[in-house]
Amino acid sequence: MVAPIRALVTGAAGQIGYSLVIEIAKGDVFGPEQPVELVMLDLPFCAQSLDGVKMELQDCALPTLVGVEALTDEAAAFKNIDYAFLVGAMPRREGMERKDLLAANVKIFKSQGKSLAEHAKPTTKVIVVGNPANTNAFICAKYAAPKIPAENFSAMTRLDHNRALAQVAAKAGVTIGAVKNVIIWGNHSSTQFPDVRHAKVTKDGKEVDAYTAVNDNAFLQGEFISIVQKRGAAIIERRKFSSAMSAAKAACDHIRDWHVGTQPGQFISMAVPSDGSYGVPQGLIFSFPVQICPDTKKWKIVQGLELDEFAKGKIDVTTKELIEERDEALKACEE
Ligand code: NAX
C-alpha cells in the first residue's frame, strides 16, 4: 500500500476549513489513489464544532481518508506532517489597528514555525492562507529554520490568480481552460499586481496573447486590475462573509500543483521566498510566476519576462508594502 500523506489544516473549524478538508480528504489534492491522514487543528473554544467536522468527514465514507484527527494541541497537530495548510489566523476586529493585527499574527506564526521545527518532517511543505499571508509565511519560515528550508514555505495568491483567469476568460468570451499564464505579483493585499501581459488565450483554435484576445487595453490596465484586487471585498459585500469555497479550491490548486508539478509551458502564481528575481529583495515572500518540476517537486521562478514601466511601478508599490510589513513583523517578534 502507498504510505499515507499526513496533511494538517489549521483553523479547520472555520469557513475555509470546512470547504477545504473535504477536498483534501476525497483526493482532489493528492489524487484518487493516495491515502490521506487528515489532521485538523483549531482553538480550544472550537473543539466541539471541530469534532462535528470530524464526524461529518467520517460520514462521507471516503476511501482515500485513512485517518482523521480533531486536535486543539499545536504540538500534537504538527507531529510528522508532510503538508501544512495554515488557514487559522487572528481576524481583524473592529477598531483594531493594522499594527495590532500584525503583532497578534506574528505570535501565532512564530509559535507554529517553532512547532514545525520541533515536530514536523524536514520535508514538510507549507501554504499560509491566513492573513496577512505573505508576512505570516515569512515569520513561520524564520522560526522553522534551519530544519525546514525556506523554499518549503509559501503564501497563497492562487485565489487572486484564479480570479484573474476568470475575468480574462469572461472578457475574451472563452472558457476558463482556454486562458493561462496570468500573473499575480507581490502581496496578497490590495497592492497586488494582476498582470496579463504574458498571458495566453486559445480562441478559435489559435493561441494568442491575452491583450489581443481581449482587445481592450484600457480595461486590462485599469478596471481589470481593480476588480481582481477588490474581489474579496465585493464578495463580502454580497455574501456578508469572506470568500471560503473559492479560497479552499485555490489552496487545493496550489498544493496539488506543488505535489504533481505544473504542465509544460504553464505557470502559476505562488508567493515564495524571493531569490532577488525582478529586483525583489531576497527572502521577501513575494508572489511570482512559478513553474514546478514534476520530478523534483521544486518550484522555480519564471525568468526573463519583460516588464514595462507600468508593471515596474506596480511591482514597486507592492514590494514596498511587503518590506514595511516584514519590518513591522520583525519588530513585533522582539517584543
Ligand atoms: P474563520 O474565522 O471562519 O476561521 C478561522 C479559524 O481559525 C477559526 O475557527 C479560528 O478559531 C481558527 N484559529 C485562529 N487562530 C488559530 C490558531 N492559532 N490555531 C488554530 N486555529 C486558529 O476564517 P476563514 O474565513 O476561514 O479565513 C481564514 C483566514 O484566511 C483569514 O485570515 C482570512 O483573512 C484568510 N484568507 C486568505 C485568503 C488568501 O487568498 N490568502 C483568501 C480568503 C481569506 O480571506
Image (cartoon, rainbow, N blue to C red):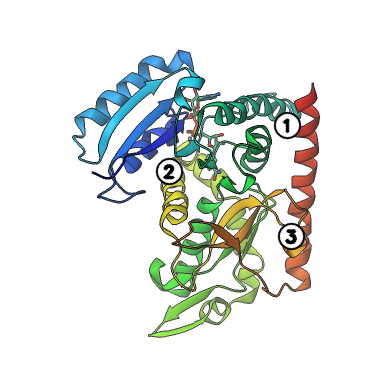
Q: Where is residue 241 shown, x and y percent of the image?
A: 48, 35
Disc 3 + disc 1, Cβ < 8 Å:
no
Q: Looking at the rendered structure, which numbered label has been put on residue 315?
A: 3
Crowdedness near tag 3: few (<14), some (14–19) or many (≥20) residues, C-alpha within 10 Å? many
- Split into 4 quadrants, where in the image is the C terminus? top right
Q: Disc 3 on helix, strand or loop?
A: helix
Name which quarter of the figure residue 301 lies in. Answer: bottom right
Identified by mark 2, the residue type is Ala
Crowdedness near tag 1: few (<14), some (14–19) or many (≥20) residues, C-alpha within 10 Å? few
Q: Looking at the rendered structure, which numbered label has been put on residue 98?
A: 1
Q: Where is residue 281 shown, x and y percent of the image?
A: 78, 53
Q: Where is residue 222 shown, x and y percent of the image?
A: 66, 65
Q: Residue at position x 51%, y 76% from top?
A: 200
Q: Residue at position x 72%, y 48% from top?
A: 284
Name which quarter of the figure residue 192 lies in. Answer: bottom right
Q: CA distance from mark 1 to mark 2?
A: 25 Å
What residue is shown with label 2? 248
The foreground one among 297 and 68 is 297
Q: Residue at position x 63%, y 40% from top?
A: 137
